[in-house]
Image (cartoon, helix red, strand yellow):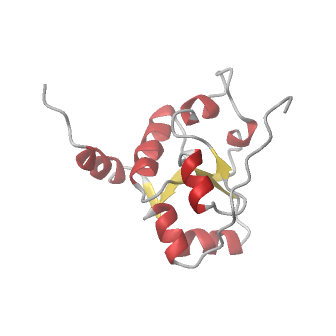
Amino acid sequence: MPIKPVEQMVREASAQITTLSVAQVRERQALGQAVQLVDLRDVRELEREGTVPGAVHAPRGMIEFWVDPTSPYFKPVFGKDSTTYVLFCAAGWRSALTAKTLQDMGMTNVAHIDGGFGAWRDAKAPVQPYVAKPKPGA
């Protein structure tokens, strides 16, 4: 069975989603626009490289469930219609695919960062160490 290359999937998704540069995201933040950054990377990536201050960590494997208000896993942080959710991963591939998936689910207020966390870090934008939330009962 032929497999569609992931690069092709990313190109197709990118043609249908909003892609923002690091500078555009920082400008929206500076203007006080309602922007929620969403870090899709694996927790090991966050522990190794840090994250963006104020970003919500939403693992790639759970975000559809966290966004869906009918899901038992829904997270209220994703229920704000006036907020633009700006996704990022390491380089922009996972976030492009995720933005497309969320659009397919009906979200209109979603974008992703071109170049992901790597571009954020390279632009000398703020980065902080990742601090894991304590497990309940720990």
Quarter holding residue 46: bottom right
Write the residue at 50% across / 39% down. 102
Tag count in the figure?
A: 0
Q: Nearer the viewer, residue 103 or 75?
A: 75
Q: Residue furthest left?
A: 1
Q: Quadrant of the C terminus?
A: top right
Q: Is residue 106 visible?
A: yes
Q: Is residue 24 left or right of residue 50?
A: left
Q: Quadrant of the N terminus?
A: top left
* As drawn, 32 above or below 71: below
Write the residue at 83% across / 31% down. 136
Q: Nearer the viewer, residue 76 or 5?
A: 5
Q: Is residue 91 left or right of residue 106?
A: left
Percent coordinates x, y for residue 57 in the rendering: 64, 47
Write the residue at 44% across / 38% down. 101
Q: Residue furthest right?
A: 137
Q: Is residue 118 left or right of residue 79?
A: left
Write the residue at 49% across / 54% down. 89
Q: Is residue 86 visible?
A: no
Percent coordinates x, y for residue 114 in the rendering: 43, 64
* As drawn, 31 above or below 13: below
Percent coordinates x, y for residue 45 in the rendering: 54, 53
Percent coordinates x, y for residue 2 in the rendering: 13, 30
